[in-house]
Image (cartoon, coloured by chain):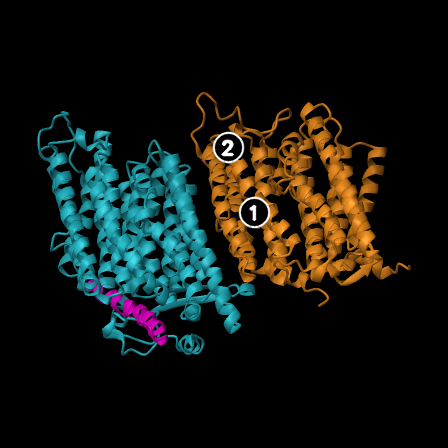
Chain colours: A orange, B cyan
Amino acid sequence: MIVTTSDLLAILPLIIVATTALVVMLAIAVRRVHRLTASLTLTGLTLAFVSLFVAARFAVRSVTPLLIVDGLGLAFLGLILAAGLVVTLFTYVYLERGVEQRDEHYLLLLIAILGTMALAMSVHWSAFFLGLETLGVALYSLIAYQAAQPRAIEAGIKYFTLAALSTAFVAFGIALIYADTGSLELDALTSLATEGSLLTLAGIVLVLVGIAFKLALVPFHQWSPDVYQGAAAPVTALIATISKAGVFAFFLRTSVVLALPLDSSYGLIVAVLAVASMFIGNLLALRQQNFKRLLAYSSVAHMGYLLIAVFAIETWALMGAIVYLAAYFVAVLAALGVLITLSGPTEEAETLEPYRGLFWRHPWLAAVLTLSMLSLAGFPLTAGFIGKVILVAGGIGNTLWGLVISLILSSIIGVYYYLRVIVVMFAPLPEGKTQAAALAVVPWSAWLGLAGLTVLLLWIGIYPSPFFATVEIVLGLGR
Amino acid sequence: MILNWLLLIPLLGGVVAWLVGLRRPMWSRWLSLAALGAYFILVLALWVTNVDRLTVATEQPWLLQFDSAWIPQIGARYHLALDGLSLVLLALTGLLSLLAVATSWQEIQDRVGFFHFNLLWAVAALTGVFLAVDLLLFSFFWEVMLVPLYLLIGIWGHERRIYATLKFVLFTQLGGLLMLVAILGLYFLHGDTTGIYTFDYQSLLGTNVAFPRLAFWLMLGFFAAFAVKLPAFPLHSWLPDAHTEAPTAGSVLLAGLVLKAGAYGFLRFLFPLFPQAAASFAPVAMGLGVIGILYGAVMAFAQTDLKRMVAYTSVSHMGFILLGVFSRHNLAWQGAVVIMVAHGLSTSGLFMLVGDLYQRLGTRDITRMGGLWTLAPRMSRIALMLALASLGLPGLVNFVGEYLVLVGVYKTNSWMAGAAAVGLVIATVYSLWMLQRIFTGENVAGWHIADYGRRELAIMTVVVVLLVGLGLYPQLLLNTTQTALTHLQATTAATESSVGQAQTLVQPYEQLPAAGGDGTAYSLERGK
């Protein structure tokens, strides 16, 4: 196996992120300067994002049997790195508020991103497993990072236990697949599309459990509200966006290979997961008073919607998945960005109380959060509407009426709780609370992140054509 | 380009009014008034300059259009077009939104800038709804309309506003999403059979005749959206709540314009796109219309909250529209359009009257009112006019609309017409009863109220003059919309009769050449 220069250039984004992790580690060893560490991370991620254009020149290309550089992978890499930049920015804002051990946070963040990138590019079970574990190990430590907070430890242990269990499922599933097909390559699965053996099917379903766990699909969602709540807000942002993107990319890949028909037993399982996640996620969010838990349940529902794309495998549906995911990322990151901005040094703005009357105190922050909620609810002018249109279109194009109707009905439930957040923001200021008391100084880095997200949210929502064109080009690479 | 200005003026005006209003609330009122004034003048100018073309039947249905790429990847275009029907509704939008700003002059005192921002953006979204002829664009405006209305009611409404707004949003959002699904279904149906994936209204006409079952379901998706907005009988329950809790301007926008969007949707989209499915569904829809007329009237009679009562009269009047449009008779369609305008004026007037009363009395409870005529004679006379309009007195424009609808329906289904006419009797009872309870009798509660001032009188004069003027000369409205309606009916009839099982009810227009010839040819082929 000879690795050529072209191979290395094709996986340049991975190499850059890995190198950045090393550089950050060395920099920390020399001197702990928060701003420097954050800047190094940002620079590394920016370079990695730029290097996607280099990598795109070599697509489609298999690099070792483990990884592939293709349109699907690059599109997800773009999403992951862009989200990574925003998460880093928000991490900086958050850690500036007097958290003690700051610098290692970035190191773990980079490792988690590296893991998801590997997931998005893997075409081999071992690459998948390595990616999953790289992500997982980084996440365990990140969730429990603020060891002074008992809740963080609790969430960390909870996530660790359940994730370890799900990893065991995945490992067993891979073993079964290997035992049956004699290969660890994803392409060896194709046989299932016609009439697979029971062993492979069992293996795939076990792997599906692991994937469903990471995506927090019902009934594997129980960890997510606790972890969303217990982890520091920037880590929540990481879990809500990046970690899901990587796993979902791999899931899409397996679905492409399996050419999943809805009426197969495997397809039925996925459909049940999707519908259950849509309804149960939205229903559980209805009565939530905690904003972070609300977002956790809302993400359960959104991942349920996203599964529609898995059934509709063609460019149109892949595009639907990416556009929807992008819209979802922007909205969730904006929401968590506002949460981070409003959080104090000791306490996060995780209940709905700090948002009461926000519009009259901080009109711009409230406007961002309002737009983000409208986007999650799927109202026009925001990216959420366009995402929903494309996703539903993909579903209808493949006559998945049942799934589409489930999406519509459950998203009506969703509108209720997103609007509740908006209602709170427009409520009159609580009595006796002066304006100054609740007013935090909004740092410029938070403004930068939020402004960028808002522009994206409206731009994709109103004039998505350039974005669509880009996604189309990327997905069509090498064809 | 003029059509774009109709969107841009309220959009930009809204932003400026908001920013200015942060420091100087009064300026934001004047600014909104100026922006809407400009909007209204622009619409009138369009009307005047096109007045000759309005009555001439042409192949091309649009007086004016603007077409440019929006999302070419999926075949969605930014396509706005104006015909007589849109023109009338835009004029109504301009006028009523001016009145809405004027009537809020004293009622709204806090966050004035943001209030006007929402009002103007609602106007912009409505304008988009009345102009869009790309189905995705239509759906875009249709749903975006909810947000400013939601904020208007949710922030400046009365006590139970949170409940009312949630109900309003959930109902309309469900309808809107079902319509979106139907639009996408139609999109794929057209694309899969012709290879052209487009949301363009005229290309999609006559698509689905070959698949009656699917067409029926898709039609129901559209029906859900429009029937919720209208509102039609079992889907109306958001309306009394939303109206009761809304500030006066919100009620004016809702009753005067938002409900009309539902009626407009039937005429513009539902019938031309799904003529057969609509025909087979017509008996049910007409039945719902009649139930709505009677139910709304009876419920109005039973209310003690004045605003709730007016809201229920809306349900009743909208029943006439539903009945009229689904009779698919040309006269009934014209009548329905006249009712849109008439109801927009008279009900907005009534809501403003209720708002004025509420400001003076601090209550909307009819049982606590009485004997106000001697205290406020000007107000009482206006109220008398509005009540007479609402009950359909000849000489006022409401009468024209209801009469035309009844004539048209009678030709289709005389029983339905008879039942609907009973609604008129109940309308007389509740209107006069309302007047008696409020303005005559003893002033038991010992009220002392001021009569109408100059601003309020001016607003109401506009309404009353138009009610009488259009009542005496309804030809102005009929002329404007006739060609547009003829076109819509011809399109409906063409696709319908092409399959050979239509019971065409539009005799005068059968001889017209079939619009959308390609669609017809195709449907003949597949219909076998």
Helix, strand or loop: magenta stretch: helix
Count the labels in the image. Answer: 2
Answer whether residue B58 is visible to the viewer in this image. yes
Figure check: B349 above or below B513: above
Q: Quadrant of residue B140?
A: bottom left
Figure check: B81 above or below A425: below
Residue at (68% x, 54% y) in the render: A252
- Of labels 2 and 1, the one closer to you: 1
Query: Is A186 within the magenta?
Result: no
Dot 2 falls on a residue whose secondary structure is loop
Image coords of residue A198 (percent x, y): 74, 53
Q: Quadrant of residue B403?
A: bottom left
Asked if the residue at tag 1 contacts the one at tag 2, i.e. Cβ–Cβ closer than 8 Å, the answer is no
Looking at the rendered structure, the kind of residue marked 1 is Val
**Range shown magenta:** B476-502
Query: In the depicted view, which residue is nearer to us: B413 or A79?
Result: B413
Q: Image check: A473 left or right of A463?
A: right
Q: Which residue is mark 1?
A: A275
Answer whether residue A110 is visible to the viewer in this image. no
Q: Which residue is mark 2?
A: A287
* Chain letter of the residue carrying label 2: A
Q: CA distance from mark 2 to mark 1?
A: 20 Å
